Image (spheres, rainbow, N blue to C red):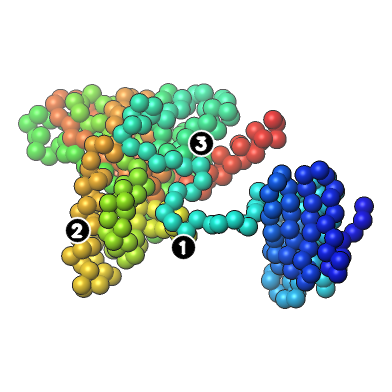
Amino acid sequence: MSKLSISNRIARIAAPMSKVSLDTKGSILTLEANGQSHRFHAIWLRDNSQDATTRDPRNGQRLITMADIPADTRLSHAEISGDSVTCVFAPEGLSTNFTVSWLIAHSYDHPLANDLHLPGGRTSWDAGLNASVPTGHLPDMRQNTDALRVWLAKIRRYGFAKVTGVETIPGALFGIVDLFGYVRETNYGRHFEVRTEVNPVNLAYTGLGLQAHTDNPYRDPVPTVQVLACLENSASGGENMVVDGYACVERLRAENPDMFDLLAGHPANFEYAGSAGVRLTSRRPMIELAPDGEFVAVRFNARSAAALTAVPFDRMEVYYAAYRRLSEIIDDAAMEVTFKLAPGEAFIVDNTRVLHARKGYSGEGTRWLQGCYADKDGLLSTLAALETQQEAAA
Ligand code: FE2
């Protein structure tokens, strides 16, 4: 195997489809693989070195800080052999290897998104999804990691899913969270009851529908996952609805970009002080985006919206028009997926993306659901670990 030097800028072909080359300063490595070219900076490669002095082989965690990497870091040598790219860094003299597949998977040498978009693996949806509501069967998911992986991937993609086969006993909803993570306890407790005895003589006080909303926007961070499990549901009505918050804000932007920018560009205030000793407040936009336009979260809950104080005076009326229009889009039946939970059924939502609602209900009977919160990072972590396991087995 011959070596590359900075001076002669040699490209060494180690496999028919792959080669590497350096620029004259040793500041950029170019990998050509499968007909595509990927450039990497020396400082980026050094920071991501996989050797045992840079990363702990036991846990993969980085052992160095930026202070340990010389500011004049450059590549003094690079070569490729099969799927392995060897890089030698000056002035340290450190040698480290990358696989071609790792480099391609982490390539950044392409136009990057700078517009509204969902993270990878997610799909926006509307009422058309009523035909195929994502569902998993709890006993299957307990016994079969493939079934669990498929269900978790549906939650990642759509932001919600139903569950069947749940025990109709108090606390059974914790068995759903046990599949992927941990319950997030709040001032409402480890779980909360959604129980109403429907009494025909007292209809004024029961059965009110609730507009689609995200839960607890007054927390920072918000609970990122909610689970609602049904123990009894003999009342008429009371269907649950879910709405894709991303699809709603995407539609708002298509209709009126200025309105979208107002809701994304100014913090709203949310608060809850309904219990003694509790005064929760948050200051976050209704539409939260990452700097590159990636959707982060929607917060929408009229019951806990507090006075707006961070909208410029001359934009307040237009802001309210935008808020009203987003509300109308959320209420549009064309956006909603509806299902009535039977005892033994539950659903889970990504509370940063998918709004949930309850339709009004009436007549005799009972409706008893239990709810709890959990966190999305644990859910996505479990899914990623199962996917890695599946890939290793394939
Ligand atoms: Fe709710």
Q: In terms of secondary structure, where does tag 2 sit?
A: helix
Q: Residue 321 carries which label?
A: 2
Q: Which of marks 3 and 1 is in front?
A: 1
Q: Residue 100 carries which label?
A: none
- For label 3, count other residues whose C-alpha is less than 10 Å away and answer few (under 14), some (14-19) or many (20+): many
Q: Which of marks 3 and 1 is nearer the N terminus?
A: 3
| Residue on which disc 3 sits | 153
Residue 183 image offset from top left, x and y in percent: 45, 44
Residue 294 image offset from top left, x and y in percent: 45, 54
Image quarter in which the C terminus is found: top right
Q: How far apart are marks 2 and 3 (CA)?
A: 36 Å
Residue at image position (77%, 71%) is: 25
Residue at image position (40%, 41%) is: 124
Left or right: 180, with 197 as reference point: right
Asked whether the viewer can see residue 307, the reply is no
Question: Which one is in front, 277 or 173?
Answer: 173
Contact, mark 2 vs mark 3 (Cβ under 8 Å): no
- Looking at the picture, does residue 72 appear above or below residue 328? below
